[in-house]
Image (spheres, rainbow, N blue to C red):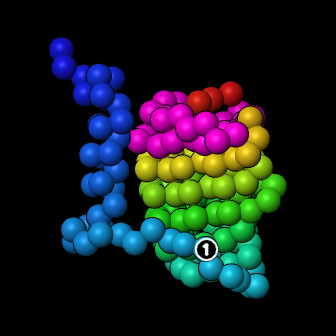
Amino acid sequence: GHVPMKESPREFNQIVLNNLLRDKTGEKVIPIKFQRASKDYRCTDEYGVKITGAYRSIRLDNCNYALLKDVYAQSLAVLNSAVVLENVKIEGKETALKSVDSTVEGTLVTLKADLPIRAVGSRIDLAGASLITPKNQALELKESKVYFSVSDTTKSKLKQYRHEIVST
């Protein structure tokens, strides 16, 4: 049979990514860019919070059904929480996303750091995501699963398209 994802992965990924770059009304989503921020955001024991804007760090601790939309930050810690990321860019030095005993779903997410994802006991589902690191390792997982759809990882300047499940 005809399997476009395997036969022409670059072209297939670009078509799907172009669709992800539009919101529900069909308007083009503007990718989030670097923004200087000096404030931190903390969520503890809350339900249904919506976060937008620029932050130095974001920490969600026991926050369920949190939504981060059009967010720029230097680090994101998700602890015992369930969060949805839409058009989010995390650019930091050490770890971009730290997830412990959590569920993270993301569309149009960029995670750039020495270690883009560190996860323990978590499920992370990413579509249209980019993981960028100057090192050779993009993931550090313990008892976790990461689902990649139409995504890529750049390690030491080498780009790899990802459509797979990575688990430990």
Instruction: Relative to 105, say whether 38 is above or below.
Output: below
Q: Position of residue 72 (x, y in %)?
A: 60, 72
Quadrant of the image occupied by residue 1: top left
Instruction: Relative to 35, say whether 62 is above or below.
Output: above
Residue 86 visible in this rendered orientation of the protein = yes
Q: Residue furthest left?
A: 1
Query: What type is the residue that disc 1 sits on?
Result: Phe
Residue at coordinates 48% horizontally, 30% vertically from top-left?
164
Q: Residue furthest bottom?
A: 38
Q: Position of residue 29 (x, y in %)?
A: 36, 69
Q: Position of residue 128 (x, y in %)?
A: 43, 50
Is residue 131 found left or right of 137 in the rendered image?
left
Residue at coordinates 33% horizontally, 23% vertically from top-left?
6
In magenta stretch: residue 123: no
Q: Nearer the viewer, residue 88 or 51?
A: 88
Q: Which residues are magenta?
A: 137-165
Residue 42 visible in this rendered orientation of the protein = no
Q: Nearer the viewer, residue 38 or 146?
A: 38
Q: Please name the predominant secondary structure of the magenta segment in the image.
A: strand
Residue at coordinates 46% horizontally, 64% vertically from top-left?
86
Disc 1 element: loop
Residue that numbered label 1 is attached to: 34
Mark 1, other Cα within 10 Å: few <14 / some 14–19 / many ≥20: few
Marker count (numbered): 1
Quadrant of the image occupied by residue 19: bottom left
Instruction: Relative to 31, say whether 122 is above or below.
Output: above
Residue at coordinates 35% horizontally, 40% vertically from top-left?
13
Is residue 7 found left or right of 113 in the rendered image?
left
Quarter of the C terminus within the rendering:
top right
Quadrant of the image occupied by residue 108: bottom left
Q: Nearer the viewer, residue 138 or 14?
A: 14
